[in-house]
Image: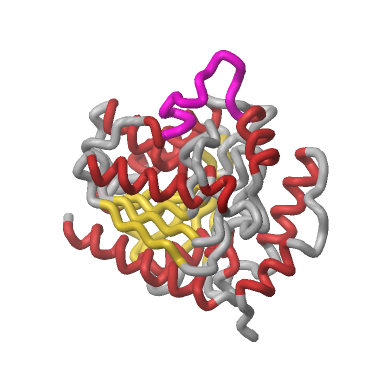
Amino acid sequence: MAEVGVNEIRALLGAKPRPQGWAARRARIEEVGAVWPAAPDISLEQAALDGVAAEWSLAPESDPSRAILFFHGGGYCSGSILSHRRMASEAGRAAGARALAVAYRLAPEHPFPAAYEDALAAWRFLRAQGYAANKIAVGGDSAGGGLTLALLMRLRDLQEALPACAWLVSPWTDLTLSGETLTTKDAADPLLHRPYLEELAQAYVPAGVDRKDPRVSPLFGAFGGLPPLLIQVGSEETLLADSTRLAAAAGAAEVSVTLEIWPRMIHAWHLWNARLPEARRALAQTGAFVQARFAAD
């Protein structure tokens, strides 16, 4: 299978205009995300947790007693198990773990707190399956990264056992859209621009809920006591400042943070790991990080 460069991924993303309407947008992200399906050696198994669909994936060499809980991106309004299957399954392979991808409920039909509640349900499902908290890593891209952080803060506040670590890819942590790179990286980013992000935020956050509420914008939450974080973000993203400000705030709260800013990479480039070498390298570094955290406990 021939390799591609990030410019070819940009061309793929720009081949069609952004569709209008939630159904068309959801179909488009599945179409693009499924261009390269899961590797043939990956075993897939459906799961259900309190009515929410989920999917296990496992590479032959992985340890099924360890797990990655994965939340897909899509601005809380689109994205699915299918669109992110290649990313979730290869993250599991890299970490030597079983991956559980969760199809949390989507806005606008199911605004906050639906996804927030589904994230906790997914965590408790894993724990009920017998997984030790310190053998679970939690992660996701974009909105899934924000949802990961919100879950960590909730578990800490509930005084529940915390996962070994978290992995955040291009996380959307600030739904107030106050990051300076929304302006400075607008011309470079092929995917996310302020008007679209504003539409997503309006669909997800109900009237009367402050967008600075850490449950929807975890950048404004308290970070003390969270497990180690790996943040991976591209240099060409409008959401770059969501990652850099997150790393600074978490580090100031004495959380162990690894921030990787990947030159020339675009939003959630890990999705293209079947053909994009930088995506596979990022996943390899993710795997090393997660395995080190599993070994430390």
Query: Based on the displayed image, in which of its 4 quarters is residue 236 positioned?
Result: bottom right
Q: Assess whether residue 216 is covered by the magenta stretch.
A: yes
Q: Residue furthest front?
A: 184
Query: Where residue 104 sits: x, y (%)?
Result: 56, 38
Q: Is residue 90 above or below residue 175?
A: below
Q: Of residues 240 and 5, which is closer to you in this image?
A: 240
Q: Residue furthest bottom?
A: 2
Secondary structure mostly seen in the magenta stretch:
loop
| Residue range corresponding to the magenta coloring | 204-218
The N terminus, quarter of image:
bottom right
Query: Where residue 219 sits: x, y (%)?
Result: 40, 36
Q: Of residues 277 and 90, which is closer to you in this image?
A: 277
Report whether 207 appears left or right of 120. right
Q: Is residue 6 above or below residue 26?
A: below
Residue at horizontal 48%, vertical 69%? Answer: 263
Report whether 259 appears left or right of 79. left
Residue at horizontal 26%, vertical 41%? Answer: 226
Query: Where residue 244 sits: x, y (%)?
Result: 39, 50
Report whether 112 appears left or right of 36. left
